[in-house]
Image: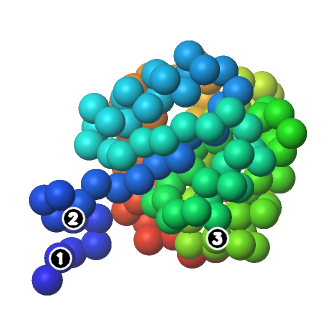
Amino acid sequence: MTLPGTFVAGDRRSVLVVDEDEQIRQLLVFLLEQGGYEAQSVGDGLEAVEELRKRRFDVVVADYDAPQLDGLRLSLLMRILWPQTPIVLMCAGPQGVKGWGTELGVFSWLSKPFTSDAVLAQVENAVAAEYVS
């Protein structure tokens, strides 16, 4: 029997990264893969929806200010279509948005600029939470 949050050899958790900035996407994919995750990235919220339709991800890390479908709207849509998948929103703006984001299903927030430790901690927390909104 495997305890919740315990990884089995060969069991790599998957993360979808959503950000319009190619460099940020590459950095996050690198950090997540170094942390033992399988990571994939897309440039906006609409592309994220397409990927979420194709396969299951354990966590989505998305930019709050993503083009076409921003992070909050993506989060709301995910609560309807994929309620078991936590979303961590990245935000460089005012801290005030954090208060009402949780009402739309945001699991947690990651401030930009971020550290590798902060990214991995947020993703690990989301994976371990066995999230259901």
Q: CA distance from mark 3 to mark 2?
A: 23 Å
Above or below for 73 versus 111: below
Q: CA distance from mark 3 to mark 1?
A: 24 Å
Question: Which residue is depicted at the point 62% across and 38% down?
Answer: 42
Residue type at tag 3: Trp
Of pointers 3 and 1, the one earlier in the residue sequence: 1
Image quadrant where residue 80 sits: bottom right
User: Considering depth in this image, is 127 or 77 the residue closer to the camera?
Assistant: 77
Q: Are marks 2 and 1 in contact (CB under 8 Å)?
A: yes
Query: Whole-percent x and y of residue 128?
Result: 37, 62
Residue 12 seen:
yes
Q: Which residue is mark 2?
A: 6
Question: Which residue is depicted at the point 35% across and 55% down?
Answer: 13
Q: What is the basis of the colouring in this image?
A: rainbow
Position of the N terminus by quadrant? bottom left
Position of the C terminus by quadrant? bottom right
Of pointers 3 and 2, the one earlier in the residue sequence: 2
Q: Which residue is mark 3?
A: 82
Using the image, tell me which numbered label, if any, was put on residue 2. Answer: 1
Most extreme residue toward the right, as rendered? 68
